[in-house]
């Protein structure tokens, strides 16, 4: 049964896409937490781009746990930390930056690239997820554009590492951030301890590695 846990802290999963955010979503749903509607959250991308924070704050009042866009975008965690002073934050990471790069390029190639190749700018602009152009809008907001090589490995890894470092620096003197690699054997125990529950299982349930790294 899903429920909104009144007087319980908000939980924001702020890891980059393809670091285990879908696994976290499943974990929280399995344990009865009210997880924010992802489609409604994704549609807040324009509010995020325009730095119109009111719709995002209002959306955060609808549930307890939130993940993916716009929560995986830069600096929003600072606003949320101030607005929800008891909030907890979870930064998911891959075992290495190269693992993350390989995962996101493989994932995007499967969904948006022609014949499985790495997508071009035009491929993303023509992608029809949610609406035509949505994927390019979200990609550009996160990574910018490198002419003729939008998936430039050095650039994307640099952005990924810089964002993670910025999050760690911001929270370094606070106690409301958990850094988590869902592929590690004790990750469920760490997560359960952090949010103060007893987990139904000891490892993240997953059918294949593709699913666990969403």
Image (cartoon, rainbow, N blue to C red):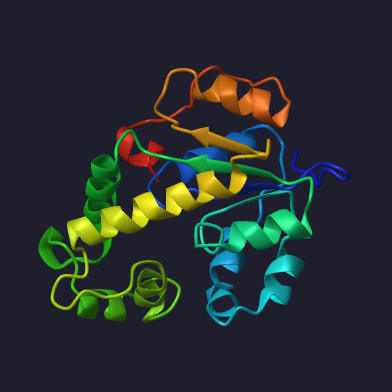
Q: Residue at x 83, y 43 (%)?
A: 5
Query: Could you tell me residue 132's position as x and y percent?
Result: 37, 81
Q: Nearer the viewer, residue 51 or 38?
A: 51
Residue 158, by quadrant, is bottom left
Residue at 50% x, 57% y is 72
Q: Is residue 89 above or below residue 72?
A: above
Task: Examine the rendered structure and indicate whether residue 97 appears above or below residue 70.
Answer: above
Residue 136: horizontal and vertical position, in percent?
34, 75
Q: Residue at (27%, 75%) from the top-left corner?
A: 145
Residue depicted at 49% across the width and 33% down the height: 180
Asked if residue 123 is positioned above or below residue 115 in the image, the reply reads below
Q: Nearer the viewer, residue 46 or 208?
A: 46
Please determine whether, in this image, residue 98 is positioned above or below residue 144.
Answer: above
Horizontal side of 166 relative to 153 (left or right) equals: right
Residue sticking out furthest to the right: 7
Q: In this image, 149 relative to 71: left or right? A: left
Give the number of callouts. Answer: 0
- Across and down, in percent, residue 76 comes to 59, 62
The image shows residue 45 at horizontal and vertical percentages of 53, 73
Please state, as top left, top right, bottom left or bottom right, where the N terminus lies in the image: top right
**Left or right of 135 in this view: 58:** right
Asked if residue 171 can be seen in this view, the reply is yes
Residue 130 placement, left or right of 119: right
């Amino acid at each position: 049964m899903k429920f909104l846990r009144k007087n319980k802290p908000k939980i924001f999963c702020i890891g980059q896409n393809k670091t285990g955010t879908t696994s976290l979503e499943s974990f929280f749903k399995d344990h009865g937490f009210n997880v924010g509607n992802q489609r409604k959250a994704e549609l807040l991308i324009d509010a995020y781009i325009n730095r119109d924070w009111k719709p995002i704050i209002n959306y955060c009042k609808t549930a307890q746990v939130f993940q993916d866009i716009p929560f995986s975008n830069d600096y929003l965690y600072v606003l949320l930390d101030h607005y929800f002073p008891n909030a907890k934050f979870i930064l998911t990471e891959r075992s290495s930056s190269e693992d993350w790069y390989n995962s996101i390029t493989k994932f995007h190639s499967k969904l948006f690239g022609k014949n499985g190749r790495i997508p071009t700018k035009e491929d993303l602009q023509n992608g029809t997820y949610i609406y035509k152009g949505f994927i390019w809008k979200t990609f550009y907001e996160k990574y910018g554009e490198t002419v003729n090589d939008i998936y430039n490995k050095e650039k994307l890894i640099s952005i990924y590492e810089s964002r993670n470092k910025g999050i760690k620096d911001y929270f370094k003197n606070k106690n409301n951030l958990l850094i988590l690699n869902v592929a590690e054997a004790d990750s469920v125990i760490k997560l359960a301890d952090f949010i103060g529950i007893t987990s139904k299982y000891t490892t993240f349930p997953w059918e294949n590695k593709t699913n666990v790294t969403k």
